[in-house]
Every structure is written in structure tokens, then in C-alpha cells.
Amino acid sequence: MSKIVIEPVTRIEGHLKIETVVEGGVVKEARSSGNLFRGLELILRGRDPRDAQIIAQRICGVCPQSHGVAAALSLDSALGISDKIPNNARIIRNLIQGAHVAQDHVLHFYHLAALDYVDVTDVAKYEGKDSALNSVKDFIARGELGPFVPRYEGDYRLPPEVNQQAVAHYIDALEIRRLGHEMVSMFSGKIPHSVGIVPGGVTATPTVDMITSFLWKLRRLQDFINNVYIPDVLAVASAYPDYCEIGVGCRNLLSYGAYDLEGDKPDYTVRKRLFSQGVTSADLKPGKLDISKVTESVKHSWYEGSSSGKHPAQGETKPEYGKDGAYSWVKAPRYDGKVYEVGPLARVAVTYAYGDPTMKKLVDWALAELKAPPSALFSVMGRHLARALSAKFIADNLEKWLLELKPGEPTFIEYTIPEEGTGAGLTEGSRGALGHWIEIKNCKIANYQCVVPTTWNASPRDDNGNPGPMEQAITGTKVKDKNNPFEIVRIVRSFDPCLACAIH
Ligand code: FE2
Ligand code: NI
């Protein structure tokens, strides 16, 4: 019996430790610990409710737009105006969040995950004229290979020319991210933390110029997703077919649905959304989501035990560092008492399960390209593939929404802050199901609770001792070389964890 401890896990957002017990080369037990407390939920208490979407975005510099939208949705419902948001505003929120998420998926694959599979040192043999690759080649010659090293060694399988091409795409992806950020800031004011998303709508008013400029950038983003990102994911998955079986996890998937396609129903859970809301599992059958069944356990988290098992609307954040039996600042959200994975895989699978024809075509096509069965979705490569398909599904719809904007029509509605009120904002961040719950008393925020995608995925054991989704995905994995535990970091990174968000 031996231990593998990875701390910190690099090339993710935030502070994560993974501890495993390995016996006979197989992981018998895994623990995921988020080890930096934040306290944004506490900072929000006692403030003017209109501060919520500004402060909540500070939970994360990677995922702020999704927090902005979740906060605005929760405020809209607490203010009683969720069914009165002008169409232009609903669409602009979709454009901001969609452009953000699509570029964030590109960021994850190229700048965070791909280096687990792509051997940058092959660029030393590069003979072509690409100036970016030649400068990487110069760096290699001078022995200056950061940020690509240090890294694990011994399992890079792509042929040299594919490696070189992938490094060129790593550099191209930086430009695509800049473009995505420009698209976001066009309607949101600035990034990372958008000032343009507000309760009641958005601050931007669309003009023909903005629409044309957004469209031009969007076309380049779509071109990259279709002709570079998706083919690269398929190429990596083909070279690492064992990773279509490694990292399966709990196989329960949950999506809140996202990108409102209509705005006249006050209840977000019955609204038509681009991504469906619901649950599914290995059979890929659709299941209805009952939001009242979401709870957060803290038995193994550093919070007072009295707050365990509560629905987020009544949730509490009472830190108790060093508590017996606890090993993480991440709480353990559960649905109907069971462990659920969230993320692009979940929202793609739930949308597929609900029979969306475009999503069905996309997923079936991708699986056929890989010659893989639907069960391969529940794996490291399945998560990467679902993320790329999520990017395409969003980007292809951005164009449609953009052309539905009506310059000159309103993007904002007036409101008054009520003495008392409650609201919930449910959406899908890049990394999965995101919920914000607000309680207003005496015109101030009395309680604010966030249950964030990585809170689900990186959660520790719950009150019943069930390990979280990432812990389950790691357990049972064969580790070939304990000094280079590729398998573990590849599984963790396939979830695209964001620990700043998870602990908030
Ligand atoms: Fe929270
Ligand atoms: Ni984040």
C-alpha cells in the first residue's frame, strides 16, 4: 500500500490537493481537498441587493460572467421581475455568457488539459517557417521550456508532426481567447468582471455596428471550434483510446439548463432553454429535475455540522477549520441524497437525453468518428469531447440570437427593492450547474448562498460517507508509474475544476 499525493494540482484554477491510497497499482481510495477559504457569501450579507451581481462575480476571474448571470437571475426573481426582462436583455445576457463559455472551453482544452497529451519538446525537430513555432524551438534550444515543464514523463503518444501542430494550435488558441473576450466586453462593458449584467436586464444598447462586429469575431471563433478544436479533441482521443474508459465516475449527471429562449415565465425551471434542465445517467434517459432536492452536506467539510443537509435557500456558511473528520473547504452538494456530476458532459448528455435533434446529431456523429459506444461519454475523453461539442452548440446559436436583437428597443426594466424577498438564479457556467440563492430582509441581503459546478464535482464525502464525483472517478484507476501519475491528473483535469468557484 502506498500513497500518491498531488499538491497542488497545477493547470487548473485554484488550490486543490488530491490524496490517493494505491494498492497493487490500483487506486483504492481518493480524497479531494480544496484548501483555500474565500468567504464571498459572508461578504455579501448586509449589503444592498444591487451589489450582488458585482460582488458575486469576484468569486472567480475565470468564470465571472456565469456568476453575473446567476446573480442577476436570482435578483430578478427576488424583485418579482423575472418575467418582465426585455427580450433584448435576455438575448444580450445569452451573448455575453455564451461567448464567455465558448472561449473558456477553448482555454481549458489547449492551455490547461492538452499538455497532458501533447509533447512540446517535439517542436525541437520543427523545420517549417511558422514564426511562433520557431520561437518555441528557440526557447527549447535555450532550455527555457516553462510553462510547459515541469511535467510528468513517459506517456506522450502523438506523432511529432501532430505534436508540432498541436503546439501551433495552443498559440492560435490564445488569439481565439482574446477574440472571445472582445465579444464578451462588447456587451458587458469589460472583462473579467462585467458591469453590463444587472438586475432588470443589461446596460448595453445594441447597435448595428456592435452586431456586425460581434458576428465577424463569432465567425472566426466558430471556424476555430469546427476546424481546429473538435478535430484536435478527436485526434487526442484516438491516440489515447484507453482514456475513453478511464475516469468513469458516478454516472449520475445533472444540468440546470441554460440560455433562456423565452422570458415570459417567472419560474426558471419550466423555461425553454438551449441546454435542457434535468438529470440522466448511464442509460441516457431523461429525468425531471426537482430543485427542492438539492442539499449541501458538510460532515467532511470545514464548516459547523449544524448547517449540514440544508437546501441552499436555507443554507449557511459557518467556517470551522480543523473540524474532526473534515478535509476540505468544499461543501458536498447532493441531489436527492445522491452523488451527481455536473459540467459540459452533464448538460450535453441531458440535452441529448431530452431528444434535442441538433445535439443528438452532434453527439452521434462524434461517437461514430471515434468508433466508440455512448458509454465512452463517461470517461476522461468523453468529458473533453462533450466540452468541445458544448462550445460548438453555443457558438452556432450565438449567431441566431445576435440576429434577433432589435436596436432601439429597451434592454432594461425599472424595479424597486422590496422590504423582503427570496430568489434563485439557476444557469450553467462553463463547468456546470450554477445556482445562486438570495434572501432579502429590510431591503438588505440577509443570506446569499452559491452552489457552484466545482462544488459538486470536487466535493468531499457527504454525510453518508459517499465520495464526491472526482473522488469516485479516480478510485479504481490503475496507475502505471506512481512517480508520474498521469492517470490521476488527466482524470482531475477532465472535470476542468475551478476551486476559486468551488469554495467562494
Ligand atoms: Fe456555497
Ligand atoms: Ni471559477
Image (tube, grey):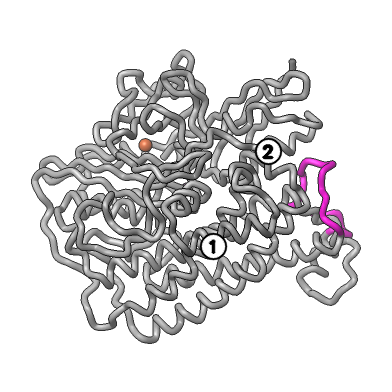
Disc 2 + disc 1, Cβ < 8 Å: no
Q: Which residues are magenta?
A: 140-159
Q: In whole angstroms, how far apart are the C-alphas of marks 2 and 1?
A: 25 Å
**Observer able to see residue 144:** no
The x and y percentages for residue 422 are 18, 43
Position of 109 compared to 393: left or right?
A: right
Q: Mark 1 — residue?
A: 361
Position of 384 compared to 306: left or right?
A: right
Tell me the SS state at disc 2.
Answer: loop
Q: Mark 2 — residue?
A: 246
Amino acid of disc 1? Lys
**Observer able to see residue 26:** yes
**Magenta segment main secondary structure:** loop
Amino acid of disc 2? Ile
Cβ of disc 2 within 8 Å of ligand 2? no
Q: Please identify the residue farthest to the left as the structure is shown.
A: 419
Q: Residue 85 appears in which quarter of the rendering? A: bottom left
Image quarter in which the N terminus is found: top right
